Image (cartoon, rainbow, N blue to C red):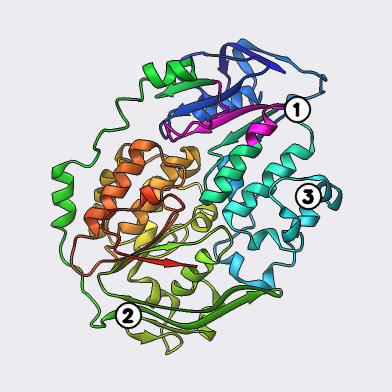
Amino acid sequence: MEVRITDAVVNNPEQRLKAPVNFTFNKGEAVAVVGRNGAGKSLVANIIMDTFPLIQGKAEYMFEQTPEWVYQKIKLLAFKDAYGADDSSYYYQQRWNSTEQEGYPTVEEFLGSGILEKSDLFDMKAHAGYRLVHLSSGELRKVQIIKALSSEPELLIIDNPFIGLDAESREEFSAALKEISKKVGIILLLSDLLALPDFITHVYTVKECADFRKYTVKEYLRDSPFMAETGRRELSEQKRAAILNLPAAKESGSEYVVRLKDVTIAYGGKTILDKVSWDIKRGEHWALSGHNGSGKSTLLNLITADNPQSYACDIELFGRKRGSGESIWDIKREIGYVSPELHRAFQKNVSVRDIVASGLLDTVGLYVKPPKEKMPLCDFWMDMFGIGGIAEKMFLRISSGEQRLALLARAFVKDPQLLILDEPLHGLDTCNRMLTREIIETFCRRPGKTLIMVTHYPQELPSCIDKIKKL
């Protein structure tokens, strides 16, 4: 399988890079397309996929078996596929509402029993009866890979393949991709500028939707334009001071922010959490860890009251027992939250500023305009996360990494007492991960700020983390 893209310009203005694209993929290569968030990696993938007609240049494909359509032999696993299919009927909290999940297929139904039996990847046979909506993002990514390979593609393009995977799964996944690359062409779209799997042979760099260059791995590590950026500190002293000098928010009088006692959650005969207890004092900064499927997201959604079973559990929040008359909005008022499930739920094509402003009202979408005096806070946090320049762009028209930055700004905008960050750095490039980690550290230096953070990469944890809860 070989691909030749020559001086390509697509007819869709929103999918164009600033310069014509020239790209080659030769048999035996394994290629990484590397760039910062919003640089144009997904645009390149769409050109390779022949998604849009060209108004200039040409695309040539040398398949082993010539298909009727390019998409039959080239499969793309986009960023959103880590969270589930592009299903407009999906809504936030659906994963936790067991009465509304009958329409979601099990792993076996989605893949087909024959595919599941034949596949020796990831040992997903043990998950055959689980509904897709119950899988963690890491487990779901494995299922999507098996599904893509079942159609016997000649080229597989994967956007940020390792997001949502724990350390053991990353090693397993990387080894699987290495074996797959011996039979199927592989192109990885990577935001981490240095995390190149060992089977990658060539690297394309994309900068600002232009400056598209091909390197061998050795050349890239020696000459790449990104090398100088990876050690750069992003949060200026001025911005750090601005965060530290924000007016103090009103605190609850309780010593404990969260108290869980013997919490047990089960779905369809599968126990997710078994008698979990956890006390979190005001001002503590916790890392929540555990392998894929261990129940981390379930536990966090009990705290935020997005899981209806939270009202049947022994839970206290800010000194108030769950179910004592508070509304879900009372609970959310003091919590800033971001997660893979929340990211998936934002399917309304509104402006980035409106996405950030929705955090003031705890809505998925902006149905009521916040008070005008609150809007400067939106601009403040967009500036902190470096997305002020795209405030008027439509959320579904920006890159997945830029979307994640908007959702992070949304979590901080109401200056919450409790910050719950479930895989907050998913899909962020090297510099934006550094920036976000510094913002979290600085925010948590303020009195009374409590943090729970989930990540499968220990190096991503901010230095303020002082306690660990492992499931």
**Is residue 358 located in the magenta-colored stretch of the structure?**
no
Quadrant containing the N terminus in the rendered view: top right
| Spatial CA span between label 1 and label 2 | 54 Å
What kind of secondary structure does the magenta stretch mostly adopt? loop
Residue 467 to residue 269: above or below = above
What whole-number distance in Å separates the C-alpha atoms at marks 3 and 1?
A: 18 Å
User: Measured from the top left, where is residue 235 in percent x and y?
Assistant: 22, 42
Q: Name the residue under label 3.
A: 111
* Residue 60 occupies quadrant: top right
The image shows residue 131 at horizontal and vertical percentages of 71, 62
Q: Which amino acid does label 3 sit on?
A: Leu
Residue farthest to the bottom?
324
Q: Residue at x 32, y 47 (%)?
A: 436
Q: Name the residue under label 2.
A: 318
In this image, 207 relative to 343: left or right?
A: left
- Please give the name of the residue rendered at 49% of the width and 38% of the height, measured from the top-left corner: 397
Which residue is the site of mark 1? 73
The answer, for residue 165, to whether it is visible in the render is no
Mark in the foreground, 2 or 3: 3
Kindly identify the amino acid type of the residue bearing the numbered disc 2: Phe
Instruction: Determine the residue positioned at 50% across, 68% down.
Output: 471
Residue type at mark 1 is: Lys
Residue bounds of the magenta highlight: 177-201
Q: Earlier in the sequence, mark 2 or mark 3?
A: 3
